[in-house]
Amino acid sequence: MRLNELSDNPGATKDRKRVGRGIGSGKGKTGGRGVKGQKSRSGVAIKGFEGGQMPIHMRLPKRGFNKPNRKRYAELSIANLNRAIESGKIDGKTDMTAEALVEAGVLRRAFDGVRLIGDGKVSKAVTLIVSGATPAATKAVEAAKGSVTVLDETVTRREKGVKADKSGKVSKADKKAAKAAASAEEKPAKAEKKPAAKKAAAPKKAAAKKSEASADESAYLAPTREYDADADNAIVTKIEKYLGASLKNRDAKYVSCSDETELETIVKGFMKKKMGVEDKDAAMEKVKAVCETMKPTRMKNRVTFYYLLAKNEGKLGDL
């Protein structure tokens, strides 16, 4: 017999059923899924549906309830306890509480307490203080001359019909009286501060006089004095009145030296009519000279611009 003559027994293997490979295969066209519908698509698994029969989660009866204040305990088996003793994590000299067991590395976390479970043998006497313990686990620890103390975690409930003791609480009337007494003590302290407030009121009058004096000054005087320290408020006010309501418009409030049309308007208007400069080219050169003077300022104030034009012409007094 040769290797190429070896074969499986008849019926030991079965050909895989291929779908969607023609009508002769028995699983052609729709591949055994039927026509249309949710279950003819891939990835369908209707949870809890058992073909129409009553599903298991409805056949079984309901039992119990979900306790809202239930506690979760970490379980410590006798086998793990003995393993920790042999590895030296527990020396048997100190009382092992839930916190001590976590600190020693016996438990990862204690949750709401520790329950001792299981049975077996303990190699050394240990003192355990736990939230619960099975009889077999308690017997295993006590057989090694150890002890298991179960904490009393029962909640004492008030009997039905017995009212709660409110003797230690303060009534609302007492609270109001205490609050009124505290506010009465604070009032004299506030009254003492009033004369000091009157003395501080004197500088305010001087500040008010200064503000009245500054109110007479034009808002454009300060920016004009950046170029002419001796600028007169009366002349600045005259230019402001000459421009009139146009200053309320943001575009008219500032001069754009890059706009040739605007510069020509200044030449035809202010330079020709107000300053009396008839030569258009000469007037344009004077306007551009003021642009060069105010070059560091990005937004060139129109009042200051006209002031400098009049100053260069020596006609500030003729405005």
Image (cartoon, rainbow, N blue to C red):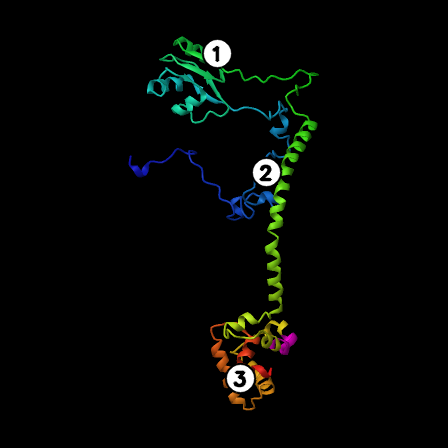
Q: Is residue 244 magenta?
A: yes
Disc 1 on helix, strand or loop? helix
- The location of residue 19, given as percent across then percent down, is 51, 45
Q: Which label belongs to residue 314? A: 3
Residue 134 versus residue 313 in the image, above or below: above
- Position in image of residue 73 (x %, y %): 50, 23
Location of mark 2 (residue): 46
Q: Nearer the viewer, residue 150 or 297?
A: 297
- Marks 1 and 3, how far apart in space? 116 Å
Kindly report which numbered mark, 2 or 1, lies closer to the viewer in this rendering. 1
Q: Which residues are magenta?
A: 239-246
In primary-sequence order, the first of circles 1 and 3 is 1
Question: Circle 1 sits on which residue?
Answer: 135
Residue 299 appears at what percent x and percent y?
53, 72
View extreme (bottom): residue: 279
Q: Is 191 in front, or is 63?
A: 191
Please say if 300 is above or below 4.
Answer: below
Between 294 and 199, the one nearer to me in the picture: 199
Q: Quadrant of the N terminus?
A: top left
- Magenta span: predominant SS is helix
